[in-house]
Structures are given as C-alpha cells and as structure tokens.
Amino acid sequence: MMGNDLITQAAQRVAELKGYFVDHERFVPLAEGFSILAEKRLVDIQNGRISEAQGLALSGHSGAGKSAAITHLLAQEGQRLADRGYGDSTIISLRVPSPATLKFVGQMLLRALGYPIGADRHAWYIWDLVQHHLKERRVLFVHLDEAQDLASRGTKHELDSVTSMLKTLMTDPEWPVGIILSGTNELEDILNHDHQLARRMKTVRFESLSPAAYGDDILDLLESYCERANLAPEEDVLELSHGERVVHAAANQFGIAIVLILDAIEDAYLQGQETLNRQNFIRAYHRRTSCDAEFNPFVVPDFMRIDARQVFSRENRT
C-alpha cells in the first residue's frame, strides 16, 4: 500500500507539471487572432476612434485542450495589456451558466465586474448596468467559456436575445467590447444561427488528432514532460506505436493526451521510479477507466478496435 507521504509528494509534483503550458501548432492561429483584435482596439482608443469591436470563437470536441489554451492566452495577453497601462481587468472571463438565460448571464458578468446584483431586477436593467460598468472599468474583451450553453434552453427566443445582446456589446457607440467565445462544436451552430454575430467573429477550430499523423508529435510532448518531471523515458514509450496508442487512448483529443501522460507520470512517482515506461500507462489507463486488460489500448496489439470513450469495459460483462 502506498504511503500518504508518497501520495502527497506525487500530487505536488504533478500539480507543478499541470502549470506547464505546451505550445503547439494549433495555438498559433488562436494567439495571432487575438493579438490582431487587441492591437486594432488599442489603435482605435489611442486615436479616439469608436469602431465596432470584433470577436474570436474557439471550438472543438470536449478534451481538445481548448480551456488550457484559452486560459493561457488570456493570462498572457492580459498581462501584456496591463504592462502597457490598460489595467488588470482589461479582459473579463467567466463560464456560461446552464441554463444560460439572458438575465443570468448578465448577473454573472456584473459579479465578475465587482458589482453583484439581486435577482429581482429586470434583464434590460441588468444589461444596462453591464454596459455601464464595462465602460467604467475600460474592459476591452469579455470571454465566455462553455459558450455552447448559450443555447442550452433550446428556445429560439432566448438564443436570439443572448446573441443580440452580445452584438450590442460589440457595437456599443460609446465603448464597444470584443467578445471571445470558447466551447464545443455546438458553438458553431450558435454562430451559424446568427449570421450578424458570425461575421463579427474570427474563428479557430481545434481538430481531433489522427494517430498516424500525430504519433511523433505526442512522443515529443511526452519527452518534454519527462524532462520537466525528471524521469527518463524508457524505450517502450519512445516507439512510434506508443505515440499512436496515446492518441487513440485519448479519443483523438489533444487535451486528454496530456492528461494521460500526466497520469502515467503520476503512476511512476507513486511507484518510486526514476523512469517512465509502458506499465505506467497501462496502470494509469486502468485507474481512469476500470477496463479489463482486453480493453486497454496500452496492452492489446489491435488497440484501434477499442472504444476509448468507454469505461468499465469487461470481457464478460453481464
């Protein structure tokens, strides 16, 4: 049985690794897209111009790594803007509630702006306050994560109301604010529902990974994490087939691939190892899914037949 001290040390070391953001090729268009929007907005402010703001939408499957990418981007760009004298509240970020009523989204925005308000106010009053405080705080961008939940109520009227208000913020005649949306593929349906909102947005999509195309990239990622973790990767985790196994075990999603690598590193720490090997991935996958060995992509030769989205898979399940 593992001692509590070993478990605590492993948790601390993995927590440090989780703070390490991996730059990847899909992050480049996201970062460049935001930088262009920010610079356009700053030029307008410096020249005393009022122009409609533009926005940015990031979509992808769950586990694609969107949250990590957008969190890193906003922290990086927020600090850059603060260093240029635009304050520490230049970007307001919040997760969309579900169900995302117009009133509830406005209340959450006010709370993020440091102005909580009771639920007894009308939606129009709440959003008037939102626009006022965005201007007073000189907020340049509002980020809404899990933005697909803007359509969670399923009514066209509510969706029309929310998207209309987002457009209102972007076209405010006194202080236009850029909108950053991130969410699953359903976010694309929302933008296609409202073409006026869509045309004001730059779009980036995090595609799913292909084992054959991204096996080598995942091995590079694995080696980078091993270096930071002070673990030597053994030969069996540096084979191309192992990189392909990681991609497939992650259901072809970049963010989940990182989680699997960190889970395997954590297992190595828990075993008191100084190296990382395939057994660590076998145990880490089992710990995540409770699947029998016959359904573990790091065990069977024909791993592509396994549905990596399933948990509790057993040979003789009754």
Image (cartoon, helix red, strand yellow):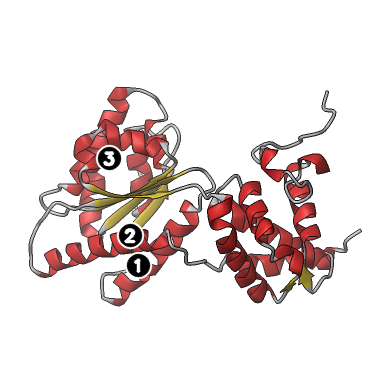
| Above or below: residue 273 compared with residue 197 | below
Which sits earlier in the primary sequence, circle 2 or circle 3? 2
Residue type (three-letter) at the residue carrying disc 2: Ile
The residue drawn where x is 82% and y is 71% is 273
User: How far apart are the alpha carbons under marks 3 and 1?
Assistant: 28 Å
| Above or below: residue 104 compared with residue 211 | above
Residue 5's label in the rendered image is none
Q: Quadrant of the C terminus?
A: top right
The secondary element bearing badge 1 is classed as helix
Residue type (three-letter) at the residue carrying disc 1: Glu
List x then y, in percent, for residue 19.
Answer: 56, 67
List x then y, in percent, for residue 11.
Answer: 72, 64
Residue 37 figure quarter: bottom left
Which sits earlier in the primary sequence, circle 3 or circle 1? 1
The residue drawn where x is 21% and y is 36% is 195
Neighbours of disc 3 within 10 Å: few (<14), some (14-19), many (20+): many
Residue type (three-letter) at the residue carrying disc 3: Ile
Residue 77's label in the rendered image is 1
**Is residue 122 visible from the viewing direction of this image?**
no
> Can you identify the residue that label 3 sits on?
126
Which sits earlier in the primary sequence, circle 1 or circle 2? 1
Tell which of 126 and 306 is nearer to you: 306
User: How far apart are the alpha carbons under marks 1 and 2?
Assistant: 9 Å
Tell which of 64 and 299 is nearer to you: 299
